Amino acid sequence: MLFELPQLPYTVDALYPFISKQTMEFHYGKHHQAYVNNLNSLIPGTPFEHASLEKIIMEAEGAIFNNGAQIWNHTFYFEGFSPKGAKEPTGALAKLIREVYGTFDAFKEQFSKAAATLFGSGWAWLVKTADDKLAITQESNAGNPLRKGQLPLLTCDVWEHAYYLDYQNKRPDYIQAFWSIVDWSVLEKRYSQKV
C-alpha cells in the first residue's frame, strides 16, 4: 500500500498572516511530502507494507516509525487549523478545560509553555487519557501519544521547519500566532471519540 500526501482542508495561503504561503509550501509541500516518499520507499518487503499509519506508530521502530509518525502528526496538525474556525471550545470540552486548568486562558498559557520549552524538535500535545482526563504532553522528534494509549486532541509542531521562515528563532511568537488558527470545532469532534 502506497501512502499519499493528504489534501489540506484549505488553500496553502489561507492561514496568512499567521502562517505564510511560503511556510506552507515548504512545511506541507516539501517536508510532509518527504515523509510520505520516505515511508513508501521503506516499507516494501517489511511487515508494515500494508499497515495503517496507526499500526506503524504502535509497532514500528527506527526510520519506519519516524516517517510514519511524522506523516500522521503533520496531517493531524494541519487538519486542526482553519482560517475561520471556532476560536474557543464549547460544550463538554470547554467544561473539562475549565475544570482542569481553571480558565481557557490558563490552559493556553500552560500549553504554550510546553510548546516553548520543549528542547530541540518535537510536538506539544493536548490529549484525552484513558480515564477521560486531559493532559498536556511533550514528545520529542516524531513522538506520538497514541503509543501511550492517549487520544490526541491538539498538537503544535515545534520543529523549526514549522515556523523558521516566518518567525526565525522566535518560537514563542509562532506559538502565539498558532492560537489564531486553531479550529476548536475540529477538536470537539476529536474529543467525542473513544481513547
Image: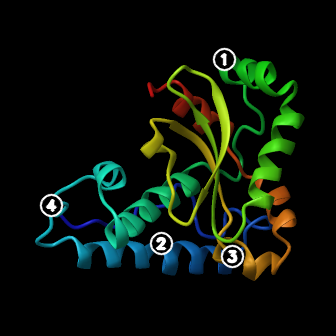
Q: Is residue 36 left or right of residue 116?
A: left
Q: Closer to the camera: disc 4 or disc 2?
A: 4
Q: Residue at x 60, y 69 (%)?
A: 12
Q: Residues within 10 Å of mark 1 (few under 14, many from 20)?
A: few
Residue 63 vs residue 95, the one in the foreground? 63
Q: The disc labelled 3 sits on which kind of residue?
A: Glu
* Residue for point 65% across, 50% down: 82
Task: Say few, some or many: other residues with alpha carbon within 10 Å of mark 4 (under 14 / 14 to 19 / 20 or more).
Answer: few
In this rendering, position of residue 139 left or right of residue 61: right
Element type where label 3 sits in the image: helix
Residue labelled with disc 4? 47
Q: Earlier in the sequence, mark 4 or mark 3?
A: 4
Look at mark 3 in the image and give the residue it sits on: 160
Q: Earlier in the sequence, mark 1 or mark 4?
A: 4
Q: Are marks 4 and 3 in contact (CB under 8 Å)?
A: no
Between the residue at mark 4 and the residue at mark 2, the CA separation in whole angstroms equals 23 Å
User: What is the three-letter code of the residue carrying label 1?
Assistant: Ala
Whole-angstrom CA distance, mark 2 to mark 1, is 33 Å
Sequence-first tag of 2 and 1: 2
Question: Which kind of residue does numbered mark 2 sit on?
Answer: His
Provide the residue designation for mark 2.
Answer: 32
Quarter of the picture holding the N terminus: bottom left
Evaluate if marks 3 and 1 touch, with contact meaning CB atoms under 8 Å apart. no
Give the distance between the C-alpha atoms of the residues marked 3 and 1, in whole angstroms.
34 Å
Q: Where does residue 147 sit, x and y in percent of width and height?
A: 43, 45
Q: Are marks 2 and 1 in contact (CB under 8 Å)?
A: no
Could you say which disc has been placed on residue 92 in the image?
1
